[in-house]
Amino acid sequence: MSTFQTLGLGEAVLQAVDAMGFVTPSEVQEKAIPILLESDTDIVALAQTGTGKTAAFGFPLIEKIDANNRKTQGLILSPTRELCLQIAAEIKNYSQFIPSLHSVAVYGGASIHDQARQVKRGAQIIVATPGRMQDMINRGLVDISEINYCVLDEADEMLNMGFFEDIKSILSHTPNEKNTWLFSATMPKEVSQIAKKFMSNPVEITVGTKNSANKNVKHEYYTVATRDRYPALKRLADANPSIFSVIFCRTKRDTQAVAEKLIEDGYNAAAIHGDLSQNQRDLVMKSFRNRQIQMLVATDVAARGIDVNDITHVINYQLPDDIETYNHRSGRTGRAGKEGTSIVITTKSDARRIKSLERILKTTFEKKNVPTGEEICKIQLFNLAEKIEKTELNDEVDQYLPEINAHLEHLSKEELIKKLVTVEFTRFHDYYKKMRDIVPMDDKGRGERGERGSNDNRDGSTRYFINVGEKDGFDWMSLKDLLKDTLNLGSDVVNRVDVKEKFSFFNTPTEHTDAVLAAFNDLYLDERKVNIEVSENKGRGDRRRRNGGGSRFSKGGGNRGGNYRGGGDRDRNRNNYDNNNGGGSGNRDRRKRRDRY
């Protein structure tokens, strides 16, 4: 077995290795470092996220840099600010015993002139994002015409994010005789184009197989009805009490909405996406690294560069469009030799894509059922018992024990244990006994009894018909927000929201039926009366008990145009609702295009 001492590294770098506690090189380090140290060559290294690629190129780069020459000799390009800062910090750690070697992080969101001054003072290595580097070149603030080494880290991600032209332009300002080291998790055609155009007979090393999944990551998927996607997420979180996860959504809007719902439901969650300021992003990431946030909801672009250890789960709330993005998502867990789990919450439309992922990634996705309320209560109960068992005794409580014993001495051991665990157990038991279990769906969208989306009321809830749907600018999240706001009955009352083109369905506990019907007696949406009816599905027929009578699409009088009105202090402008909650049909298509990632 190789050690860092046998790879050919110098004394100063080996001192840093010892100081950082590195013991055994990873596979990509073991393969890449000797090649890069022994010869001046181009290299293409394919390895999954979290396998130690930064040290694989960082150690050799430091060894080859002339620390006594203050001229810029090495350029490292990375896709995001977060990853840029992390690489720069690692380079400083690796070179901590070479005081004359300096590196500078160059990225957007900070003063370009301050960064230029740091480069001018003497930086042998520049770590940069493509956009800011291109800007500095255009302004004449940096000279990379004499560099000896250029590293493209997470090359597939940079190209996936639209930096193809920037990278080509930046590389055109570098000398032809330099060495280019390309590190990537996957090898899409754009990466191959860069390799062919800017590299000369590169050595190729591969850890695992191309476009393969990390062997330390277990893949699971849960097929549910569309309306059950968020309830399934909650149950999966509750079924994994020690979860420390990244949840991926496709759009900024969904990311923010899911995070807000998790926070509202009592989870330690936060969102990270492109609409946050850099200061907000930094605060969120600091809280996540400190584990003050247990569930980080992210878009793919915003999650680039998240290098946080011990992430237990990656949850794909929605599948991405391409295989490479899924591979990068799942690579956030199972790092540094540890095991992790990648979960996909799917609907029937994703069934074929799961098969494609299995075929291309050469791995297996285990189909599982969303845990029942009873199963979750059991998991939480045993988790509590384990926490109590592992809790270290605090001697500071000794002074209070006599009085506490006096209060509890009449209880037997069994009664005391039961009362202790009941405190936590009751919270989950009371919640889930009121909630229906999520019916397992097959890959064709059928429930376990063959039904397609059960509408029965055997779970103690009432199902309603409402005459608004996708044509009114609603999806299930925005409609649920409207229903909760109008009913004002609490956060867990509205569930099973199912939005169709011109109408929708939803459920509430049966005891709220009269209040629900009364709340919509005088509600208008764009001059149209909102009608709500109890849906009593009897198979082929459907009887409805209506609120307020009248036709389903009766017009409102007076000046109701452009507003939805609920009587009294429920009046509010529809445009404001659209702006705050993402509804509205006029700009919906443009918003969808603009909001993606």
Image (cartoon, grey):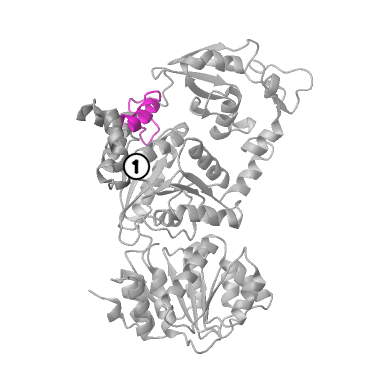
- In the displayed structure, 370 sits above or below 168; it is above
Q: Residue furthest right?
A: 558
Tell me which secondary structure the magenta stretch mostly adopts: loop
Residue at left 48%, top 75%? 151
The answer to whether residue 160 is left or right of residue 59 is: right
Report if residue 307 lies within the magenta region: no
Pick whichever, 382 or 376, lies toward us: 382
The image shows residue 373 at horizontal and vertical percentages of 34, 29
Report if residue 439 lies within the magenta region: yes
Residue 201 in sight: no
Pick whichever, 90 or 301, lies toward us: 90
Q: Amino acid at mark 1?
A: Asn
Magenta highlight range: 421-450
* Secondary structure state at the residue bearing disc 1: loop
The residue pinned by badge 1 equals: 240
The image shows residue 473 at horizontal and vertical percentages of 63, 33
Image quarter of residue 253: top right
Q: Residue furthest left?
A: 413
Task: Count the marks.
Answer: 1
- In the displayed structure, 520 sits above or below 17; it is above
- In the displayed structure, 341 sits above or below 566; it is below
Pick whichever, 99 or 551, lies toward us: 99
- In the displayed structure, 33 sits above or below 346; it is below
